[in-house]
Amino acid sequence: MLLERASGLADKITAYEALKTAGDEALQFQTRANQITGASDKISRARAALKEMRDAGVSVDFPLSDGVTLAERAKELRTAMTGNPSVIHDPPFNLKYEFLDRLINIATFAERTIAASWKTHVRKSANFGPSDILDALFAIPQFRASVTRIRQSRAAVEALGEVNPADPKAAIKQLEALVEEQAKAWSDFSAKDISPNVVKFIRESASDGASLASYSDEVRKWLTDNDLIASFRIRLK
């Protein structure tokens, strides 16, 4: 009886050890699968984001120097695992440092490049010009309402450029609307008791630049009297 019980216990221990070994191996496979899936998802999202930006007309310069090497390693690993899945535990190269980490770094770099490219695109599209003119004009009570409206419009554009858009094409339309709103705010720029010639000069200076012909004695005197003469610069194109 004792020998039978001992034999039965040995069988149970053997079965337990077999199950434990299988469980440990399954856990290792799951860990590797999670690592590879995480890197794959990041690369897929980065690829999709790059395509959406470019399709929307946003220029994104994203060189990929070691893409061929990583593609070859992915092919090598897939081929090896086809014959023996356990190869994933002892791959022909360092899976973490020579493959997965590099894929994640590429995805992270793509996200940063997209963010920088989007911000540059927004700034170029808006082409606001210096903000110090607005700061100076805000000191003139008659201009404060117009300046506040322009600042609000500018802030909305800048906020748009700070976040990578989920839908670049929709974001482009929103940007175009905000740019039009900014242009209208400047076209409506006006003030009571201030010469139209002065207002015209200020409006042109803040947009694409005023001509020297518009810098009349009347404009110069008004700028001098209001301590604004130093806020404007002559720019030669």
Image (cartoon, helix red, strand yellow):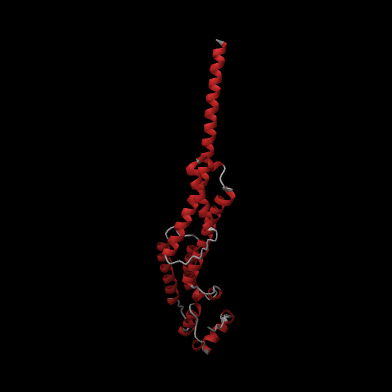
Q: In front: 211, or 10?
A: 10
Q: Is residue 235 above or below residue 112?
A: below
Q: Is residue 119 above or below residue 81?
A: below
Q: Is residue 51 above or below residue 231?
A: above
Quadrant of residue 89 within the rendered picture: top right
Quadrant of residue 174 within the rendered picture: bottom left
Q: Residue at x 49, y 75 (%)?
A: 143
Q: Position of residue 45 (x, y in %)?
A: 46, 54
Q: Position of residue 230 (x, y in %)?
A: 59, 81
* Residue at the farthest front position: 83
Q: Residue at x 50, y 77 (%)?
A: 206
Quadrant of residue 236 within the rendered picture: bottom right
Q: Position of residue 203 (x, y in %)?
A: 47, 79
* Residue at the farthest top position: 1
All told, the count of numbered labels is: 0
Q: In front: 176, or 9?
A: 9
Q: Position of residue 65 (x, y in %)?
A: 55, 61
Q: In front: 173, or 107?
A: 107
Residue 37 visible within the image: no
Residue 17 visible within the image: yes
Q: In front: 69, or 164?
A: 69
Q: Residue at x 54, y 25 (%)?
A: 16
Q: Quadrant of the N terminus?
A: top right
